[in-house]
Each structure stands twice: as C-alpha cells, then as structure tokens.
Amino acid sequence: KQEVTQIPAALSVPEGENLVLNCSFTDSAIYNLQWFRQDPGKGLTSLLLIQSSQREQTSGRLNASLDKSSGRSTLYIAASQPGDSATYLCAVIITDKLIFGTGTRLQVFP
Amino acid sequence: DAGITQSPRHKVTETGTPVTLRCHQTENHRYMYWYRQDPGHGLRLIHYSYGVKDTDKGEVSDGYSVSRSKTEDFLLTLESATSSQTSVYFCAISGAVDTEAFFGQGTRLTVV
C-alpha cells in the first residue's frame, strides 16, 4: 500500500525566509507527483506537477524536485510572504489513484 | 480555473437518510474522483471513475456508492447517512493518469 508522508506537519517562519517542505512515498512506481495548496475552508489549488520522467519543475518562487529512487520530493519556496500561509499537500498518482500526504501547515508572519 | 462544480456546497441531514452529492465538470476529462477530508486523516479516496460507467473503490468506500452515466457528472450517494460520514467532500478531475488534477470547492456535509 502506498503511503505518503509530509514533514514537518507545521512550520512557522518570518517573512523573507527560504524554506523547504518534504514529501516521501513508499512505492516508487508512480506516474507523477503533484503539489497543492489549500487555504482554510477552501478547495485545493494545483501548484506544480512533476511527471515521473522529470527531476524538477519551477513556477515563480516555487521549485519542486522529484527523486523516484529514494521516494522523495521537496517543495522549495523562495522569499516567503504572508500570502504563502496555507496548508501544502503532496499527492502521488499510482495506477489510477491520487494518494495524498497529510500536509504541512505553513504560517509566514510579517 | 478548471470547470468543476460541486453541489450542494453545504448540507445538513439526519442519520439514516439518503444523500447524493453531485460533481459536474465542463472539461471533458476522463478521470473523476471523490475524496473526504477529515482532521487528522487528510484526504482519503472514496471512489473514482476512469470513464462512463467505469468506477472503482478507494480506501474508504464502505457506506458509499457512485454512478457516472455521462462524462460530465459523477454522483456520490450515501445510502443511509451516519454521523461518521460528517466530513468535507471533494471532487477532482484529470484528463489522464499523468496529467494535472483539479479540485472542486468542496461540499460540507453534516449528519445529525
């Protein structure tokens, strides 16, 4: 059974810091990995999709890497801002299923 | 934004009553998913569909059934609602197994 773990569960940082969120998965036979953001009481917003043949993807201040062999992905957020405060979720697709980690709750304070 | 609409957005129902939640998409995507989100458990897959009339179970399918009679609609039914089914339900869509998934805004269901 695929298990997806996210560390840390919560993170509080001052504005301007660069930070790294971690995602690990037990089965490396994934099609792709996707990072999402969820604001309180809202749905999930897709941030980045990394396909299994790729090593990383970038979008603005976000950079996500994927190492299938070690079962790890990281989401790097540069120059964090208060508006980045949210829960960040990673999800892997294996066969037809999208399996989620439990998320990292990020707070960026001014 | 991807064209996904969940209805209703909020519902309160009594134990033992049937409830149907609807997910409607305008993207003509093949895959549709139903998840529930609960504190301490994250997002858990209930059922999913890989085409019209093609569905399969996820990890928490007991007490739930689904139907997909046309590409754009995926229905989740609680045959006899229980308090343990109080949750926020999310629908997601994707075009293929290796493409981006998009989520609806969620349905908050309370079973009293």
Image: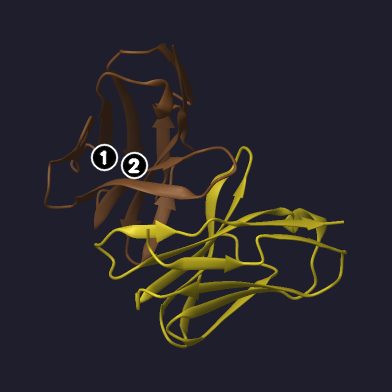
For marks 1 and 2 on the same chain, the one whose residue lies earlier in the sequence: 2
Give the percent coordinates (x, y) of residue B31. 38, 72
Name the residue: 35% across, 73% down: B27
Chain in yellow? Answer: B
Numbered label attached to residue B108: none
Q: Kindly identify the residue that appears in the image at 37 percent across and 58 percent down.
A: B1
Q: Which mark is residue A71?
A: 1
What shade has chain A been given?
A: brown
Q: Amino acid at mark 1?
A: Gly
Evaluate if marks 1 and 2 touch, with contact meaning CB atoms under 8 Å apart. yes
- Return the chain for callout 2: A
Tell which subunit mark 1 falls on: A
Q: Examine the image and state in which quarter residue A66 appears.
A: top left
Cα separation, mark 1 vs mark 2, equals 5 Å
Residue drawn 24% across the image and 22% down it: A78
| Amino acid at the residue labelled 2 | Phe
Q: Nearer the viewer, residue B70 or B3?
A: B3
Callout 2: SS? strand
Answer left or right for B36 relative to A52. right
Q: SS class of the residue under badge 1?
A: loop
Residue B20: x, y in percent?
A: 69, 74
On the image, numbered disc 2 is attached to which residue?
A25
What residue sits 35% from the left and 78% below the top? Answer: B28
Foreground of the two, B56 or A64 = A64
Structural crowding at the residue carrying mark 1, measured as other residues with C-alpha within 10 Å and reported as few (<14), some (14–19) or many (≥20):
some
